[in-house]
Image (cartoon, grey):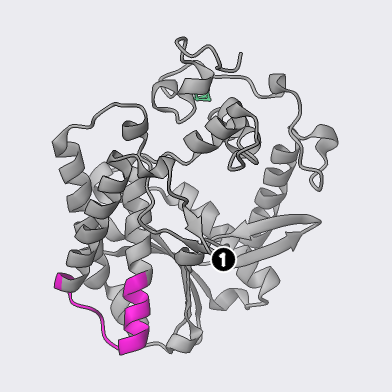
């Protein structure tokens, strides 16, 4: 977000802050509401990630991989409930989190908020992709491998609590690592899994560059914070829409240096727009540090209304 539009980054991380409070300025409340809008591909990813955690929890509790019939029924139930929640705009009145737990059916789709209906075939495609991803998981080699390991070593992302399980200090900055799943292999390896919900094969693009860096940061965490030996760490990118096809990355000491520099560079970059670069204070600099962009992104941007919509007299200049 920082690289694609600084103004968007400002809306998302700074202007929206405190916007959940009734007494917050109107523009902050609006930014907070818009920040939580989701696109169809992101929703697909969220739903598949959530149900994957439930599949793993069921495998841990019962010792067997659940049947596709049960998983697909549950997936469709969540899909339709969430779609109805968003289309009837319940997100305007119902809280996303209550008593420290996330309402997992809380959904606000961009199209519903902006009154831009999507063609039924797009919705059907998303529905089918959710089912394909779940089938990909259940039939994947990696799930069969995981089933052989000791569930006590598993770290399943706890989406219900909406918390980051891994937080570490990096030279005075707090870094949040949001790993999907970690487990200890029967060979003693330490495995960090990232579930992907795009099809590298059908798009013909792959995502290896980005995924390698993302997983590399997790690898840095495993090596430098948890103290895992490098030769035991395995970083696994699992493409659920490609039948659970897995790309494995190992991590060398050179890689570790590279990921160290990556985290360091990221912190420098993000703090460059803070007042006096002060991370602890974490207050954004003046708006001219956050220029708008002028490209095709804007029409599909969550913040279009308060940024570029000329019919909105309250938009920010
Ligand atoms: S509408 Fe365009 S300029 Fe404004 S925040 Fe979004 S992407 Fe950036």
Residue 118 coordinates in the image, percent (x, y): 22, 32
**Residue sitting at x 28%, y 40%:** 87
Residue 159 visible at all: yes
Residue 204 coordinates in the image, percent (x, y): 28, 43
Q: Is residue 294 above or below residue 74?
A: above
Q: Main secondary structure of the magenta part?
A: helix
The quadrant of the rendering that contains the N terminus is: top right
Residue 229 coordinates in the image, percent (x, y): 63, 78
Looking at the picture, tell me which residue is in the foreground, 87 or 43.
87
**Residue sitting at x 72%, y 56%:** 174
Q: Which residues are magenta?
A: 54-69
Residue 3 visible at all: no
Q: Is residue 216 above or below residue 60?
A: above
* Badge 1 element: loop
Q: Is residue 211 above or below residue 273?
A: below
**Residue sitting at x 50%, y 86%:** 188
Q: Can you identify the residue that label 1 sits on? A: 251
Neighbourhood count class around disc 1 (C-alpha, 10 Å): few under 14, some 14–19, many 20 upward: many
**Residue sitting at x 25%, y 46%:** 84
Q: Is residue 106 magenta?
A: no
Looking at the picture, tell me which residue is in the foreground, 255 or 279.
279
Task: From the viewer's perspective, tell me whether residue 123 is left or right of residue 172.
Answer: left
The quadrant of the rendering that contains the C terminus is: top right
Residue 22 coordinates in the image, percent (x, y): 60, 39
């Amino acid at each position: 977000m920082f690289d694609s539009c600084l103004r968007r980054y400002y809306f998302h991380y700074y202007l929206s802050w405190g916007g959940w409070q009734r007494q917050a300025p109107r523009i902050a409340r609006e930014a907070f509401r818009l920040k939580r809008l989701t696109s169809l591909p992101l929703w697909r990813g969220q739903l598949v990630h959530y149900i994957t955690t439930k599949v793993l929890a069921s495998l841990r509790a019962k010792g067997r991989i659940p049947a596709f019939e049960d998983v697909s029924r549950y997936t469709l139930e969540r899909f339709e409930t969430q779609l109805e929640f968003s289309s009837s705009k319940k997100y305007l009145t119902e809280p996303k989190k209550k008593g420290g737990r996330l309402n997992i059916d809380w959904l606000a789709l961009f199209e519903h908020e902006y009154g831009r209906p999507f063609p039924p075939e797009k919705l059907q495609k998303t529905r089918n992709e959710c089912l394909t991803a779940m089938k990909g998981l259940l039939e994947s080699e990696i799930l069969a491998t995981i089933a052989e390991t000791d569930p006590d070593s598993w770290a399943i992302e706890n989406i219900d609590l909406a918390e980051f399980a891994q937080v570490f200090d990096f030279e005075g900055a707090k870094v949040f690592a949001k790993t999907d799943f970690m487990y200890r292999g029967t060979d003693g390896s330490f495995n960090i899994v990232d579930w992907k919900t795009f099809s590298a094969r059908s798009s013909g693009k792959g995502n290896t560059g980005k995924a390698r860096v993302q997983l590399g940061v997790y690898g840095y965490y495993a090596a430098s914070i948890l103290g895992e030996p490098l030769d035991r760490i395995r970083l696994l990118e699992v493409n659920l829409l490609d039948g659970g096809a897995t790309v494995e990355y190992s991590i060398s000491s050179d890689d570790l240096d590279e990921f160290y520099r990556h985290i360091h560079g990221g912190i420098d970059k993000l703090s460059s727009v803070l007042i006096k670069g002060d991370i602890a204070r974490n207050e954004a600099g003046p708006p001219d540090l956050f220029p708008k962009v002028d490209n095709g992104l804007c029409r599909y941007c969550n913040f279009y209304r308060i940024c570029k919509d000329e019919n909105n007299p309250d938009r920010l200049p």
